[in-house]
Each structure stands twice: as C-alpha cells, then as structure tokens.
Image (cartoon, rainbow, N blue to C red):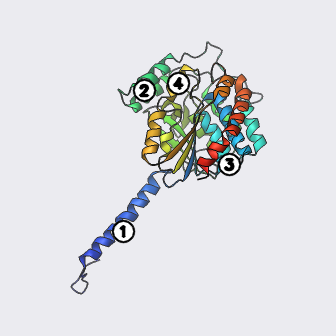
Amino acid sequence: MLLTPSLRIADQKSISVVLLILASLLFVCVRAIGSGSVNKDRAVVLGGGGPVGEAWESGIIAGLADKGIDLSSADLILGTSAGAIVGARLASRMPRTDFINAALAPSAGPPPGQPDQTSSGPPPDLTFLARKLQEMDSGKRLKQSICAEIGEWAQKVRPVVSESQFVASYQRRFPEKEWPSRGYECVSVEATDGSLRVWNGSSAVPLADAVASSCALPGVFAPVTINGHRYMDGGVRSVTNADLARGCRTALVLVPTMGADDALAKSFTHPLSGELRTLRDSRCKVQLIVPDTASLNAFGATLGDENHRAPAFNAGLAEGRDKAGEIAKFWTK
C-alpha cells in the first residue's frame, strides 16, 4: 500500500504499537508451529527399560488408576523405547483388562506359520554400546556425533532378529495405523547422522513403525527403515528424553532404570539429571516415580528378562497405589 499525503498517521506511537502486536502474534505462531510440546499443561514421560520396565510402568499406571488418577488425560504422553509402547497404549485409552494383558504378554515372535528368524548365535556383545554411552556421559564430545557412531555400528552388526520380523511384531501389537487422539509422541534417533527424531500424529507414518523405531536397541535389533531413513532406539540419546516436555506446566516422569542393578541401564539413565534441570529452568514442576525396593527386587538381574514381567507389573501396581496420594497432590493442582 502506497502512502500519499492524504494518508498520514500523526501519532508515530500508533505505528510502534501495531508493529509490536504483529511481532507478538508472529512469535506465538512460530512457537506453535515449531514445537508440539508448547502450550501443553500436563505431561507424562515414560522412560525405556525393556520388558521389565514396560511391565512396571504399566503396573504404576494401573495402580494410580485404581486410586482415581487417570494419566491418559495428560496433554502430552512422551515415550522412549519400552515407554513408547506403554505410552501408545495409554494414549489410546486401551481398556484396563487389555492394557494389563498386553503388559504381561511376552514380546511377539514370528507370525503364525512363518519361520523364526531369530539368530541362533551367541548373545549380542554390547561392549561397544556401553563404551559409547560412557563417552557420551563424559560430555567431551557432541552427543549427536557419538549417536552417529552408534548408528553406524548398529547397521553393521548382525541383529538378534531380522528388521522385517522385528517390525512385524509391532504391527501385530499396534495393527491400527491411526495415531491416538491424545498428544502422544515417541522418540528415536536417526542412525546415519545421530539426530533426534520425535514422532507424532502429524508425522504421516504408521504408529507401529514409529514405536518399533523407538525400541530398536542397537546391537540387538536392526534400525528400522522409515521413508528411506533408518532409526534406532531413542534411548541412545536418553532413556527418558524428559527435556522434550519443556513448555509443560507439570511433568510426571517414570524412570524404571533408576536404581536398577543393570550396568547398561545405568548408562542410559545418566542424562536424566540434566533433563530435569532443563524442565525446572523452564518453570515446569517435575515429579519422579522410580522403582521402590520391592519393585527393584521384582526386576531380577536384567531389565530384559521376559520372565520377570508379572513380578514387575505386580510390584508396580502396589507401588502406584501406595504413591497415589502423593501423586494426586501434584497431578491435580
């Protein structure tokens, strides 16, 4: 629009006010587009932890529900690895019986009538992975660079099962391609460049593929191919990735690896303290739920032990009920 002598604005302050308003609106729009977690009120963060962690988190959720605390009402449900599995079930509001049965069911094998492609060789050697996680914790190098090195290694080693069989097992767990209507997100890491990838309903990928990629533990499972890129377990970056809930008013963080007598689990958990600082610096109130003594005793020697699903679930159920009063004060404010 051209300004003519007849179109004069006498008060230059009016121009400044208008520009400030427009700038503010632009800032709000950019924030809304750029981050799915902005303007969320309550978040549930579900950390990884193998079959045992999956069962324990499910028990915690069921125990809290028994006391009237429905975590499926969260504005953001963020899951990593096993937490991605639990989060997808929670966000979809799976009926209680189905939710419990799914938590107790062993990880799916091959489809009926198809050969089992599980490797018959020795158990995977995760020494390289453990060493790289320790290096990451030292903070001497960029985390993304180390993640890329882990991804390169993951694409070379022979997985316990083929990529196709691994993904198919998640397609049977989550046959629906539609994402939950709640604000569910899950985390993986791009295996080539080590970059973070957060999947949600706007990612235009099947739910099962996204969850599988979040659970593809390097050295055990092959990275999952999605749209020509390969993705591995989000736990490579962090077992919780709790910092991604930044912008929420409150965040309830479940950490099955905290206190577990599992060296690899301890390495995965190291980034948590920094993530909690990030949340608190953004004025987010944070509440942790970590395994109590009874839960840790139920876990067994490793979080990957399928035989400890039921004990871990039952321990989580009891712990969730016991802590419901404390959590209710935090969650319902």
Quadrant position of the N terminus in the picture: bottom left
Q: Earlier in the sequence, mark 1 or mark 3?
A: 1
Marks 1/4: CA distance?
A: 49 Å
Residue 281, image x and y in percent?
Answer: 42, 45
Label 4 is placed on what type of residue?
Lys
Element type where label 3 sits in the image: loop
Give the class, few, some or many, for how many residues have Cα within 10 Å of label 2's Cα (few <14, many ≥20).
some
Element type where label 2 sits in the image: helix
Label 2 is placed on what type of residue?
Asp
280 left or right of 170? Answer: left
Residue 152, image x and y in percent?
Answer: 46, 25
Tell me if I can see residue 177 in this picture: no
Marks 1 & 4, CB-CB < 8 Å contact:
no
Label 1 is placed on what type of residue?
Ile
Q: Earlier in the sequence, mark 2 or mark 4?
A: 2
- Looking at the image, is 294 positioned above or below residue 280? above
What residue is disc 4 on?
Answer: 266
Disc number placed over residue 137 in the picture, else none: 2
Front position among marks 1 and 4:
4
Label 3 is placed on what type of residue?
Asp
Report the front residue among 96 and 232: 96
Q: Earlier in the sequence, mark 3 or mark 2?
A: 3
Residue 201, image x and y in percent?
Answer: 58, 49
Tell me if I can see residue 53 in this picture: yes
What residue is disc 1 on?
Answer: 21
Marks 1 & 3, CB-CB < 8 Å contact:
no
Identified at 28% across, 74% down, the residue is: 15
27 left or right of 68? Answer: left
Residue 7, image x and y in percent?
Answer: 26, 84
What residue is disc 3 on?
Answer: 70
Q: Earlier in the sequence, mark 4 or mark 3?
A: 3
Q: Earlier in the sequence, mark 2 or mark 1?
A: 1
